[in-house]
Image (tube, rainbow, N blue to C red):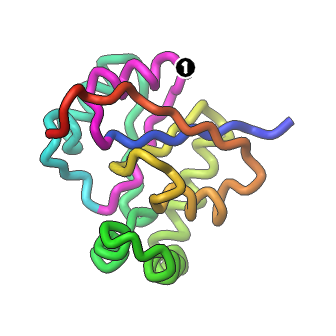
Amino acid sequence: MAKTIFTIGYEQATQAAVLSALREARVEVVADIRYLPLSRRPGFSKSPLRAAVEEAGMAYRHFRHVGTPPEGRAAARRGDRETLRRVYAGQLELPEALAHMAELRQVALEKRTCLLCYCREADDCHRALLMEALFADFERVDLTPDLVGTRE
């Protein structure tokens, strides 16, 4: 039976909605895979997110080096999937990324883990590319937190 890995994006969601989706899926470890764990959305920068995740009874881990570097984030915003794929593939070849990938895979083998980043849709995000590279033998479950009533 394949192991399961969860993914979640916080775009258009509140911290409470994200935490609710994580709890409902019985996630044990939130793996923040943003290169820069900063956000203009309240509650999603590293320190407040870590505090909320830990208060909810889950572990928080930041895996910076499996995040998308600036050129890749710009390509994703433009909807340029080919450039994102190329840039991200290069990122994953770096020694620091390889180390984070090994560590992240081990965590996911031991605990119910969820990959977290901004994009609501995993297929529009580097989460899908990381799944291909690292978790092809896992079952992927994309969590979708409730949307905020209006765009912020």
- The quarter of the picture where the N terminus appears is top right
- The quarter of the picture where the C terminus appears is top left
Residue 96, given in percent of the width and then of the height, sits at: 45, 72
Q: For this rendering, which residue is in front, 104 or 34?
A: 34
Residue that protrudes farthest toward the right in the picture? 1
Binning the other alpha carbons within 10 Å of mark 1 as few (below 14), some (14 to 19) or many (20 upward) gives few
Residue 36, given in percent of the width and then of the height, sits at: 25, 59
Q: For this rendering, which residue is in front, 80 or 128?
A: 80
Residue 122, given in percent of the width and then of the height, sits at: 50, 51
Residue at the disc numbered 1: 26
Magenta residue span: 11-35
- Residue sitting at x 66%, y 62%: 132
Check the image and report above or below for 105 versus 112. below
Quick check: 110 left or right of 63? right
Q: For this rendering, which residue is in front, 56 or 12?
A: 12
Residue that protrudes farthest toward the front in the picture? 150
Which quarter of the picture shows residue 141? top right
Is 89 included in the stretch rendered in magenta?
A: no
Quick check: 103 left or right of 72? right
Is 29 included in the stretch rendered in magenta?
A: yes
Q: Secondary structure at mark 1?
A: loop
Check the image and report above or below for 27 versus 69. above
Quick check: 54 left or right of 128? left
Q: Amino acid at mark 1?
A: Arg
- Residue sitting at x 37%, y 25%: 146
- Residue sitting at x 69%, y 37%: 4
- Residue sitting at x 45%, y 63%: 66
How many marks do you count on the picture?
1
